[in-house]
Image (cartoon, rainbow, N blue to C red):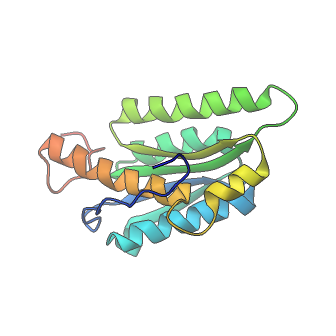
Amino acid sequence: MARGEHQPDAPLPDASPFRFAIVVSRFNEEITASLRTAAVAALAEAGAVETHVQVFEVPGAFEVPQAARAAAESGRFDAVVCLGCVVRGETPHFDYISSAVAHGIMTAAGDTGVPMAFGVLTTDTLNQARARSGPGADNKGREAARAAIEMAVLHRALSGASSRPSGFQA
């Protein structure tokens, strides 16, 4: 398939045994609200129990990794969905923020052992962000939620635990 064409989604495992945190930036709210809605819908479609999904809002993308780490360290979640939107401007600010967010999320996931799905858009224009956060299967919030489910299942399988979130210490 050509780049940008939707590929069919693989069937998702049952998300009902897992607890999910969604950390979403309020900055660029037109975009992030759509990412959040799609992520919540994807989790519900996979069977996640509504009370097992908790949304945490943060001011901007820079704060997403900090809140994701705090959610993971709480031991209450099997995976964290990280959502935000950074649009390139006229200064290097975009590069600093985008890099810090990506590295921060990866570091937090590695340090805590809790999977974190990257759903932070880094685009050149607001129109590009709109295209990636619109309705339908190509919404990046939806994709991040799907990744979180798959990683929660994988982490649980690798840990050999069936009844405790992967963030809990034995």
Number of numbered callouts drawn: 0
Q: Is residue 3 found left or right of 122 in the rendered image? A: left
Farthest residue toward the right?
A: 90
The x, y position of residue 26, in whole percent, is 70, 55
- In this view of the protein, which residue sits in the foreground, 8 or 83? 8
Q: Can residue 57 be seen in this view?
A: yes
Q: Can residue 76 be seen in this view?
A: no
Residue in view at x 47 percent, y 63 percent: 54
Position above or below: 7 against 157: below
- In this view of the protein, which residue sits in the foreground, 119 or 76? 119
Position above or below: 19 against 122: below
Farthest residue toward the left?
A: 160
- In this view of the protein, which residue sits in the foreground, 39 or 59? 39
Q: In which quarter of the image is the C terminus?
A: top left
The x, y position of residue 119, in whole percent, is 54, 48
Give the quarter of the image for residue 62.
Answer: top right
Residue in view at x 48 percent, y 40 percent: 69
The x, y position of residue 154, in whole percent, is 23, 46
Farthest residue toward the front?
A: 1
Residue in view at x 43 percent, y 50 percent: 80
Q: Is residue 61 found left or right of 27 in the rendered image? A: left
